Amino acid sequence: MTTEKTCKCGFKKGDRMITAKTRYTKGGYFWLSMGFSAKPTEVVFQCQQCGEIVDTSTDEEVIEKYRYNSDIIQ
Ligand SMILES: [Zn+2]
């Protein structure tokens, strides 16, 4: 039984329309804006089409995986 969440267009994590984005604390955004690196606190999986977030993760491994090659969500 799968309970994986889908967005309203029917995409789920792993589909091409779902992209991972990193989210930071307020302090993290500050450091980024100053040109320093900061570690994301969370990775979100968001639909490109409708903007709905289908999944989030605060797992260290997931964060490391996406930290340098994902867009930052504001
Ligand atoms: Zn969608």
Image (tube, grey):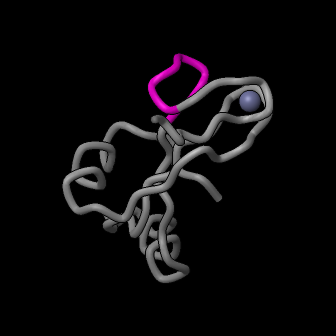
Query: Number of marks in the image?
Result: 0
Above or below, 56 against 9 in this view is below
What is the x, y in percent for residue 30? 51, 76
Q: Is residue 8 left or right of residue 53?
A: right
What is the x, y in percent for residue 48? 68, 29
Q: Residue at x 50, y 61 (%)?
A: 23
Which range of residues does the magenta coloring cover? Answer: 13-19
Above or below, 63 against 13 in this view is below
Q: Is residue 48 left or right of residue 3?
A: right
Identify the image quadrant of the N terminus. Answer: top left
In terms of secondary structure, what is the magenta stretch mainly? loop
Q: Residue at x 50, y 46 (%)?
A: 21
Above or below, 58 against 66 in this view is below
Q: Is residue 9 left or right of residue 23?
A: right
Quarter of the view holding residue 61: bottom left
Determine if the magenta segment contains residue 51: no
Q: Residue at x 50, y 42 (%)?
A: 71
State ligand 1's quadrant: top right
Quarter of the view holding residue 39: bottom left
Above or below, 23 against 66 in this view is below
Q: Residue at x 33, y 68 (%)?
A: 38
Extreme residue toward the front, this view: 1
What is the x, y in percent for residue 12? 57, 29
Identify the image quadrant of the C terminus. Answer: bottom right
